Image (cartoon, coloured by chain):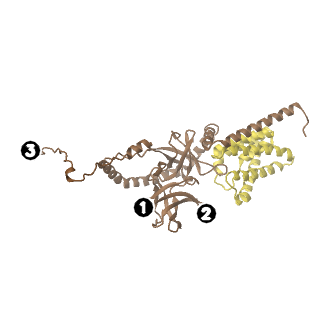
Chain colours: A brown, B yellow
Amino acid sequence: MTLPGGRRSGRRRGDLALIITLLLLGSLASSLSRARQSQVEAVVRATILFPVIQLHRASAERSAVGRRAAALQEERDSLVTAMARFRAVAEQSSELRDLSGLADPELGTVRAAEVYAGRPRIGDPDVFVLRGTRLADLDFPVGVFTGRGLVGVARAPHGSGARGEFWSHTDFRVSVVTQDGSVSGIARPVIRDEGQTILLLEGAPFQGDIPAGTGLVTTGIAGVYPPGIPVGVVRELASEEAGWMKSYYVEPAVLPAETSVVLAWDRPSLDSLMSVATYEPPPPVADSVDEIPAPAAVETPPDSTGAGPDA
Amino acid sequence: MRSRRGWVVIGLLLLFHFALHPLWTGWVAGPDLLLGGLLLGSLGLRASRAAALGFVLGLLEASMSLGPLGPTMLLLAATGYAGSWLRDVFYSDSARFIPAFLVVGVFVVQILLGLIGGGVSIESALIYSPISAGLTAVLCWASEKFVAFFVA
């Protein structure tokens, strides 16, 4: 019941135009792909919300500095132990590669980044953004991990950083193998009765058993995760499908809430991987003794008797 | 909430929300100062401007939470619009109007946000959201009293 009047109707037209504009903008934002939404959010976080995010970062650094020192010490000790254990194996592998003429494996590099997890309620606590240098030009998707184990996967650029999912995200899958290489399968997140998210190893062969406490590492198949990254430890048998396969509950190596600084894998290019993997067939095996080529003359250093190769 | 003091309170609530939110992220029922600020703001604005305020706050909140951009902006814009419209419908001089408006408004919007986020549990709907709405109203009242000391 409004009275007629030019000013009031002009105001109503302005209100209507504003509402329609907001609806259009909201619909446009809803129709954007997740990657584009992520870029819009990155711009807002880098501009209007930048002081707040810096404040959160400083506060988190301050509160976690003591805890992190102890965790770093523990992580360093475990890495020293692991290096000591695997150094001899690495040297042996290198010698074998030299002997067989194989090129050194391309392992890629890593880029350090800070993790910022999503908030519950509106956001998703199982997603994260990474803040670091030159993350946006990674070849997504790539694995994200710490010295303790696998954290998740970075899926797309987010401003100059990256956006990804923790292992606890429903879409997460990783190919794993036991540390002795005997059993492999696919690990995915599962929520247990207590509401806690852990991992479930699926596709393990029915005939074999994986004892509790067995470590699982990434296989590196498909090139998303580097091989050999710890994923978790087998806790107990979850289920068995008669004659087909078994599933196991797996205690994850890394808890998302405890991660602050991570490493994003900058995997080697496919071309370099292919060049390493190029297979050169050996010379054909002779069918008869006559076809065996004469051995090449071997140069031996002259000895004190002066006898040469012909001696 | 048309006074300068009212806008200082709203600014303070929004500042506290974005700056201090990580403190109560892990609580099962924390105060929702964003909704508190938006609903108080909608009492002092025309419906279209209240919607615009909600729209901008939705953009900030979605960016901060890594949530869905469009639905959050639209829902908070609708909240601002509805808050302003309901003020005209249920306007009252009673001192209890604003706290009751905040409690009911925060409760309803939290349920809607929960539905957008993937579902609302019974515990959340019957226990946590009402506690959160009550805490929000108490903190808004405390902020108003705090600002009253400094701003005439």
Type of amino acid under label 3: Gly
Residue at numbered disc 2: A194
Q: Which residue is mark 1?
A: A182
* For residue B23, above or below residue A47: below
Q: Position of residue A60 (x, y in %)?
A: 58, 47
* Disc 1 from disc 3: Cα separation: 57 Å
Q: Quadrant of residue B49?
A: top right
Disc 1, disc 3: CB below 8 Å? no
**Circle 3 sits in a helix, a strand or a loop, which is it?**
loop
Please name the residue that numbered disc 3 is placed on: A306
At 86% from the left and 31% from the top, the residue drawn is A7
Q: Tag 3: Cα neighbours inside 10 Å, few (<14), some, or many (≥20)?
A: few
**Mark-to-mark CA distance, 2 and 3:** 84 Å
Mark closer to the observer (2, 1): 1
Q: Nearer the viewer, residue B32 or A262?
A: A262
Q: Taking A28 as reference, is A100 left or right?
A: left
Measured from the top left, where is residue A38 in percent x and y? 61, 42
Q: Secondary structure at mark 2?
A: loop
Q: Quadrant of the N terminus of chain A?
A: top right
Q: Decide: few, some or many residues near mark 2? Use Cα within 10 Å; few <14, some 14-19, many ≥20.
A: few
SS type, badge 1: loop
Going by the numbered disc 2, the residue's amino acid type is Glu
Quick one: label 1 or label 3, which is nearer the N terminus?
Answer: 1
Q: Amino acid at mark 1?
A: Ser
Lower sequence index among marks 2 and 1: 1
Single out the mark in the foreground, 2 or 3. Answer: 3
**Is there CB contact under 8 Å for labels 2 and 3?**
no
- Asked whether residue B119 is in view, the answer is yes
